[in-house]
Amino acid sequence: MRPSIPFTEIDEATIEVAEASSPTPSGIPGPPGHPPTYGRILSAIFFVAPFVALAWLIADGHGVPWMAIVLTVVCIAVLGHAITIGYHRCFTHRSFVPVRWLKITMAVLGSMAFQGSVIGWVADHRRHHRYTDRPGDPHSPIFKGDRPIHGIGGLWHAHVGWCFTVDPTSREHYAPDLLADRDMVLIDHLFVPLAVATFAVPFAIGLAWTGTWAGAFTAFLCAGFVRIGITLNGTWSVNSICHRFGKRPFATRDVSTNFAPLAILTMGEAWHNNHHAFPRSARHGLGHGQIDTSARIIRWFEQLGWISDVQWPDARQVEARLAKAA
């Protein structure tokens, strides 16, 4: 079992380990660079393609069959939770320790969510926590590199603009623990075939379900392109909306907020101020009535014995932070 690390120190502890093994780390605040060309091309395609696919389905005039709707909802739920539970709460913040088969499953499904390879995603998010809303944060609506930004420009940068302009984050510096895990390295290398599978699987299911190429193509568009558009914009909204609008019950060094209207779509991630107050917490919906489906699933995993060392902040810890903010 790993040694327990206080809720508010996970990011600093992780970076300290990285710095010890990375004498010349990148990712330190500086002028923005550019991600690889293929990354910018893919970001552009999948920022536009889901809306084109949806428009085509609507304009077709035949409506969207229930098969495609059900498959899309299932893919959103399964692959979306693989990001929130796996990529974010487990791999980035070490909110719990999964058994090996569950760790591998979450990493594979997270890769199929088409939000980037697991190690790259974790490195970017740890960098965000290290410099949240300060120079060096890859996707803040407050800073772009070391230059202050405001208004719509800031929201655009935090939402999707950073995918085109921000320099790549050093994996060696921010994710040495994952680079030391052979399972994670292998799955990281398999990102391209897994990204292809996220389109191939709905196509195959649609073909088997309807027995027609038209049904297969509709499933491909809905559970592939449209689903990616919904989940990507949900994740990006946490970067943008949840650092600009909403409530701040906890005093944090950033401008993170809780934005209730996004709670269901983001599977609990929109309780973002809560998360920045307690980065290691397996539950982001800390208040009464704050829906957090990711936390509920994590609780089920714990009850089934599939995970251990789960980080649940108790009421006293939450009340103590709230008292400081009062």
Image (spheres, grey):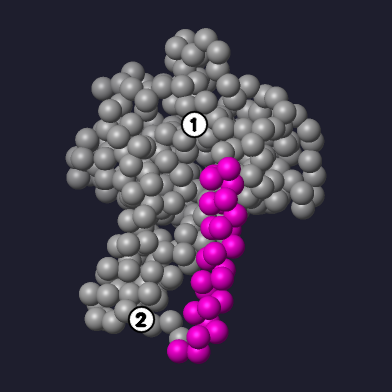
Dominant secondary structure, magenta = helix
Q: Horizontal and vertical percent for residue 319? A: 53, 35
Describe the element under mark 2 as helix, strand or loop. helix
Sort mark 1 into few (<14), some (14-19) or many (20+) by Cα contacts within 10 Å. many
Find the distance from the CA under tag 2 to the CA under tag 1: 40 Å
**Could you tell me which secondary element the residue under label 1 belongs to?**
helix
Residue highlighted by disc 2:
214
* Magenta residue span: 37-62
Q: Is residue 21 above or below residue 150?
A: above
Whether residue 57 appears in magenta in the rendering, the answer is yes
Viewer-proximal residue, 51 or 154? 51
Q: Amino acid at mark 2?
A: Ala
Q: Residue at x 33, y 56 (%)?
A: 197
Q: Give the quarter of the figure containing the C terminus.
A: top right
Asked where in the image residue 216 lies, by quadrant, the reply is bottom left
Q: Is residue 296 magenta?
A: no
Q: What residue type is disc 1 on? A: Ala
For marks 2 and 1, the one nearer the N-term is 1
Q: Position of residue 5 (x, y in %)?
A: 41, 21
Residue closest to the eye, 67 or 242: 67
| Label 1 sits on residue | 123
Q: Residue at x 40, y 61 (%)?
A: 76
User: At x 45% / y 89%, what residue is drawn?
Assistant: 62
Q: Quadrant of residue 282?
A: top left
- In the image, taking residue 26 as reference, residue 133 lies left or right, namely right
Residue occupying the point 37% across, 61% down: 199
